[in-house]
Image (spheres, rainbow, N blue to C red):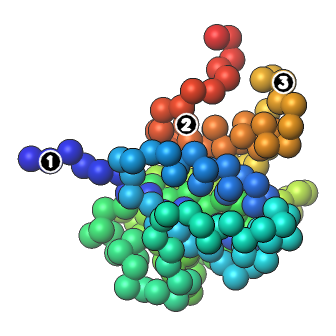
Amino acid sequence: MSIKKRKIVIAITGASGSIYAKILLDTLVKIQEIEIGILLSDNAKIVWETELENDNYKNYPFTFYDKNDFNAPFASGSAKYDTMVIIPCSMGTLGRIANGISNDLLSRAADVILKERRKLILVARETPYSLIHINNMKLVTEAGGIICPATPSFYSQPKTIEEVAKTVVDRVLDLMEIDIDTYRWGS
């Protein structure tokens, strides 16, 4: 018998908030016991380069998959990827997932995670929400997904934009069941 290695899919969409994805990837690169597959939408690359003024997403030592690569392991439940995080998650992506539209690898992978009853975390990044957005969040939640809005906390008294963004990423890491050293209320 062997110990199961964690397998995680990280998807980055074109919603504003590339800093959240960057901080998550910076944290995950330090963890050896996890297999990471990365999906970046075309818009995610543009937004990353605009917001962070670099294309450093290319430099992470993870396996990157094309949006139409349905031979990617996590396109099937048999590959046993246990978690998928979409960070940031655009409302278009959320809507396709909520309504079962698997028109690319990202939406197919989310569909697989949900049908296998595994953990899907969507870091929604939009404001304000329309009723359509809220109803789509409800559908994803009812299907077993977790909506984790990119809403920072301030009780840790963050001083930089990175520290503010890290409050969201730390919450995502908690939802992923990855032990981290972070500020905890009341400790």
Residue 164 vs residue 79: left or right? right
Q: Using the numbered discs, state the Cα–Cα distance from disc 3 to disc 1 in whole angstroms.
A: 42 Å
Residue at image coords 65%, 20%: 184
Residue at image coords 56%, 63%: 60
Picture quadrant where residue 31 is located: top left
Number of the label disc, if any, that sits on residue 46? none
Q: Is residue 20 placed above or below 152 in the rendered structure?
A: below
**Label 3 residue SS:** loop
According to the picture, the residue beneath numbered tag 2 turns out to be 174
Q: Using the numbered discs, state the Cα–Cα distance from disc 2 to disc 3 in whole angstroms.
A: 19 Å
According to the picture, the residue beneath numbered tag 3 turns out to be 157
x, y percentage for residue 8?
A: 44, 58
Of labels 2 and 3, the one closer to you: 3
| Disc on the earlier residue, 2 or 3 | 3
Contact between marks 2 and 3 (CB within 8 A): the answer is: no
According to the picture, the residue beneath numbered tag 1 turns out to be 2
